[in-house]
């Protein structure tokens, strides 16, 4: 059993259920269904829709990059981690439900709702991730993180199946109703996380908490250079995570706009990719604890590069959809392990007393330049094509791989501290 040697099984399972609860937002709204619906139906044309959706994701990234370290430091100082987790969850769920209302032509209404929901989603993830160090020991961190990521993709998969059952025709009105389902799903399945995760007692917020938080951030900026491996890792992750964010934000749009997938085919693609991602997360969660994080992240980045090249070549082939399906499955199989390993690695390297603050910087480096991928994708699409824009993703993955392999590891493939 995966948790046979873990004492706090109930808390670990409750924490993992948050990934189960929030993954449908990422899968259905950000990546596959609503993004393509926006570009094809709400926006005036797919090319303009692609650019505007990419810009919305870029705006999200900038705001999260600013907020995450500040609120992370406040959570550390005042015991507000669980409070922030609950608030951002409810905001994301509420604005997901409100996405039911925009219809064709309601461009800025739809984008405003999406940006608010997406910011709340990302901020909730920051505070959820920061619990991992509390819940795990070094020997089990890979299994626990991998289990949670895998459970998340199972949540996305179940939500997609439920969508197919409840909304089989995927008409415009049914796609709008799917957003309501995503919001309700998030509210219901996040309840165990809120009930069973513990946090220290909250202190009354004062000006001192804010000033202390700003001071703590400045101190972290000044001292983080002493954590050489963390700095190197965060810079490398900055690039390959930008590639992943671009795929998440624009993968469904590329499938519809370049490969000519229907909405039904995009839904099926989402189901298959979630199956692949769940399997990959569970398997590599165990492999990571055996062979080390270096090998696993290297494998995922290499396969992601190959898969994205296949997706780029697909429109030129005799069977565009077949090539894209192969690329999609490979990407799905590697996405979970890549993110899970990044999270568990950050957990291993983070000083215990700076969990929320360092995970705030983890989010910051994940978001600080993450607007570049979608933004460049949108710009290149507007001048050339979605296919040409895919080179943005390939280049980011290659740079991330090269920088990651500049980090010092010992013979056991763990960081040299």
Image: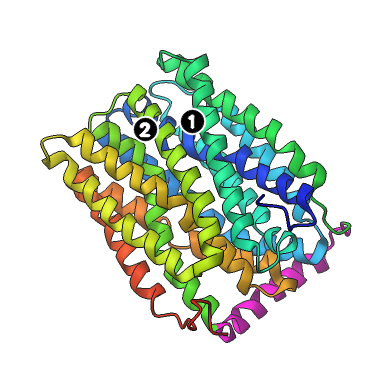
Spatial CA distance of label 2 from label 1 is: 28 Å
Between 236 and 50, the residue placed more toward the observer is 236
Q: Which residue is mark 1?
A: 109
Name the image colouring.
rainbow
Q: How many marks?
A: 2
Are there few (<14), some (14-19), or many (20+) residues within 10 Å of tag 1?
A: few
Q: Quadrant of the C terminus?
A: bottom right
Are there few (<14), some (14-19), or many (20+) residues within 10 Å of tag 2?
A: many
- Residue 401 at x, y percent in the picture: 35, 68
- Residue 152 at x, y percent in the picture: 57, 42
Viewed as shown, does residue 99 lie left or right of 327?
A: right
Q: Label the magenta part by its dominant secondary structure.
A: helix
Between 388 and 338, the residue placed more toward the observer is 338
Q: Residue at x 30, y 65 (%)?
A: 398
Q: Residue at x 52, y 63 (%)?
A: 288
Q: Is residue 375 visible?
A: yes
Between 370 and 135, the residue placed more toward the observer is 135
Q: Which residue is mark 2?
A: 269
The boundaries of the magenta stretch are: 202-227
Answer above or below: position of 40 versus 306: above
Viewed as shown, does residue 358 lie left or right of 292?
A: right
Viewed as shown, does residue 37 lie left or right of 8?
A: left
């Amino acid at each position: 059993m995966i948790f046979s040697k873990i004492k706090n099984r109930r808390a670990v399972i409750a924490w993992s259920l948050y990934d189960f609860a929030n993954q449908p937002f990422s899968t259905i709204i950000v990546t596959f269904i609503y993004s393509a619906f926006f570009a094809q139906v709400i926006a005036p044309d797919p090319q303009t829709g692609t650019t505007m959706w990419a810009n919305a994701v870029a705006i999200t990234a900038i705001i999260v990059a600013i907020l995450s370290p500040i609120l992370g430091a406040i959570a550390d100082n005042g015991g507000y981690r669980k409070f922030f987790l609950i608030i951002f969850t409810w905001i994301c769920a509420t604005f997901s439900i409100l996405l039911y209302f925009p219809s064709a032509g309601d461009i800025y209404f739809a984008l405003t709702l999406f940006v608010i929901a997406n910011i709340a989603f990302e901020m909730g993830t920051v505070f959820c991730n920061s619990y991992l160090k509390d819940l795990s020991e070094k020997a089990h961190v890979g299994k626990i993180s991998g289990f949670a990521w895998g459970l998340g993709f199972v949540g996305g998969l179940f939500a997609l199946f439920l969508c197919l059952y409840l909304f089989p025709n995927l008409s415009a009105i049914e796609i709008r109703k799917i957003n309501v389902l995503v919001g309700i799903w998030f509210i219901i399945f996040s309840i165990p996380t809120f009930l069973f995760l513990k946090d220290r007692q909250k202190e009354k917020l004062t000006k001192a908490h804010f000033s202390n938080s700003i001071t703590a951030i400045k101190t972290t900026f000044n001292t983080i250079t002493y954590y050489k491996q963390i700095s190197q890792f965060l810079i490398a992750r900055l690039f390959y995570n930008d590639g992943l964010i671009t795929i998440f934000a624009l993968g469904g749009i590329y499938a519809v706009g370049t490969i000519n997938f229907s909405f039904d085919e995009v839904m099926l693609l989402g189901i298959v990719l979630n199956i692949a991602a769940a399997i990959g997360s569970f398997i590599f969660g165990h492999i990571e604890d055996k062979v080390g994080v270096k090998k696993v992240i290297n494998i995922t980045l290499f396969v992601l590069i190959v898969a994205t090249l296949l997706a780029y070549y697909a429109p030129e082939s005799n069977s565009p959809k077949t090539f894209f399906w192969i690329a999609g499955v490979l990407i799905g199989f590697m996405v979970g392990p890549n993110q899970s390993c990044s999270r568990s690695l950050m957990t291993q390297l983070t000083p215990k007393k700076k969990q929320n603050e360092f995970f705030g910087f983890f989010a910051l480096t994940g978001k600080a330049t993450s607007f570049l991928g979608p933004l460049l994708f949108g710009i290149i699409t507007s001048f050339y094509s979605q296919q040409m824009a895919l080179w943005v993703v390939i280049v980011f993955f290659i740079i991330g791989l090269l920088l990651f392999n500049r980090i010092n590891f010992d013979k056991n493939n763990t960081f040299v501290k």
